[in-house]
């Protein structure tokens, strides 16, 4: 009984998505003007190409920020339940913070936190 319901849900989802796509293609407006393909930048026409290379340092800095930001968010749930778990919770969060600080020290030593 459950397998039949699952197949029914999948088939209904596929049918509805396909129907919406086909109806949008059939009745949607079509405009093939050259200006439609240009990027919009506050009404100012672009000069040159809009595909400029971005230095990999920006990506690395953003990834490091997200990594340390998400890891520090895990400290809040730990702080809420630390009294319930005692010394084991303290040791585990200590290990977590040591790994976090070692990762930060490694990134700092490699120069990943410097703008060049």
Image (spheres, rainbow, N blue to C red):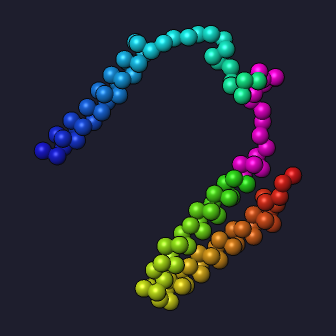
Position in image of residue 42 (x %, y %)? 72, 28
For image coordinates 56% across by 79% down, the residue present is 93
The magenta region covers: 45-60
Furthest-left residue in this view? 1
x, y percentage for residue 39?
68, 24
- Furthest toward the front, the residue is 43
What secondary structure do most residues of the magenta stretch adopt?
loop
- In the image, is 53 to the left or to the right of 28? right
Residue name at image x 48 percent, y 78 percent: 80
Q: Quadrant of residue 68?
A: bottom right
Residue located 42% across and 85% down the image:
84
Quarter occupied by residue 11: top left
The vertical placement of 91 against 64, above or below, is below
The answer to whether 36 is drawn above or below residue 78 in the figure is above
Counting from the top left corner in percent of width and height, residue 115 is at: 84, 54
Q: Is residue 14 left or right of residue 38?
A: left
Q: Nearer the viewer, residue 28 or 21?
A: 28
- Left or right of 31, for residue 8: left
Q: How many numbered marks have been drawn onto this rendered protein structure?
A: 0
Residue 29, percent across and down?
48, 12
């Amino acid at each position: 009984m459950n397998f039949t319901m699952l197949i029914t849900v999948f088939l209904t989802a596929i049918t509805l998505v396909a129907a919406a796509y086909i109806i949008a293609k059939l009745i949607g407006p079509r405009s093939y003007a050259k200006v439609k393909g240009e990027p919009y930048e506050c009404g100012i026409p672009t000069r040159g190409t809009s595909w400029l290379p971005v230095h990999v340092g920006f990506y690395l800095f953003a990834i490091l920020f997200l990594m340390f930001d998400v890891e520090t968010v895990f400290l809040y749930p730990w702080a809420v339940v630390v009294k319930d778990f005692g010394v084991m919770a303290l040791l585990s969060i200590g290990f977590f913070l040591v790994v976090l600080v070692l990762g930060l020290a490694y990134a700092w030593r490699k120069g990943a936190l410097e703008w060049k």
